[in-house]
Image: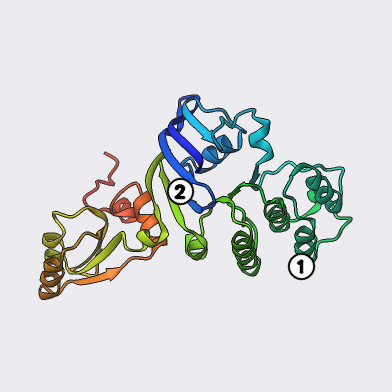
Amino acid sequence: MNAIECKGLTKMFGRVKALDQLSCTIEENKLTGLIGRNGAGKTTLLKIIAGYLRETSGEINVFSQPPFNNLTVSANVIFVHDQMNLPTALTLEEILAAAGSFYPNWNHGLATRLFDYFSFQPLQYYHGLSKGMKSTFNMILGLSARCPLTLFDEPTTGMDTAVRKDFYRALLKDYMDHPRTILLSSHYLDEIEDLLEEILVLKEGKQLLHTTIDELQEWAAAVQGKAAFVQEWSKNKQIIFSEKVGMDQMYTVVKNDFSDKERQLAREAGIDLLPVSTSDLCVYLTSSSIGGIDDVFDKNVDDSGD
């Protein structure tokens, strides 16, 4: 069964198109990473899924129902983000108690153990917490709610490295014990890669890539060697990223669809075939140009201002 189905989903903010004819499907009980640069549409998509925003056009169903202004969807979804509006008059302990009355699958034992582990005080107030501690408290809410659909939008904002590692481990352990659909948006793909089953990459409001993490790890490869050889060898390939290295070397990332014969020819030409990390690949895929930041310093560009 599919937890989320989007068909031609578009969201406009004035003349700005945050989502552009997005079509994707998220299966139930999968842990999926939502990846994209700032402005790619990640937060907008999550807000529409959670029912916070209404789409401009297209169609979206969450557990087979439109999510906007839908109490059934709201009761089965928790959206964790760094702008959560929690009651200022309640202490942290009281917020946890209130959450237990709203979420049917709420596990107060887990919430209490995480609360103690991260050294919160029962009489503290949410508005008095640091940015990192707010994110940690939000994480406790997201995990303990055990909603059928859990949305994490950059949940580790402000957390230090040790707390991020604890969060990822807690997320994985609880997900394995209590499977549900989790969509995790993050800038730290290298940190969450081992958690994920699938990855959805957005670029300019569109789906760029949706695949399993195993397939992503083999999706591309890098070729490196003398520039002339690399350019000739990769001219019929899908080039994702390319840069010159030193005086006469070139590093080019291409779609990994090599035949055995091509691999042999590359070796004979002195070209190295190298793996590409998933985090680097996503950076290359979502870049606005094949050369990345180096294109800004292209010597062929006239800087005279004339």
Q: Seen in the image, is 210 located left or right of residue 170? A: left
The residue singled out by tag 2 in the image is: 37
What is the residue that sits farthest to the right in this orientation?
123
For the residue pair 76 and 112, the one nearer the viewer reads as 76
**Rendering coords of residue 4 (x, y %):** 51, 40
Q: Residue at x 63, y 36 (%)?
A: 73
**Rendering coords of residue 221 (x, y %):** 27, 64
Q: Seen in the image, is 269 located left or right of residue 28? A: left
The residue singled out by tag 1 in the image is: 117
Q: Specify the quadrant that holds the C terminus.
A: top left
The way the protein has been coloured in the rendering is rainbow
For the residue pair 184 and 229, the one nearer the viewer reads as 184
Q: Residue at x 54, y 34 (%)?
A: 64
Q: Seen in the image, is 14 located left or right of residue 171? A: left
**Rendering coords of residue 137 (x, y %):** 73, 55
Q: Quadrant of residue 239?
A: bottom left
Say what amino acid the circle numbered 1 marks.
Tyr
Q: Is residue 57 above or below residue 121?
A: above
Q: Nearer the viewer, mark 2 or mark 1?
A: 1
- Sequence-wise, which precedes: disc 2 or disc 1? 2
For the residue pair 86 and 115, the one nearer the viewer reads as 115
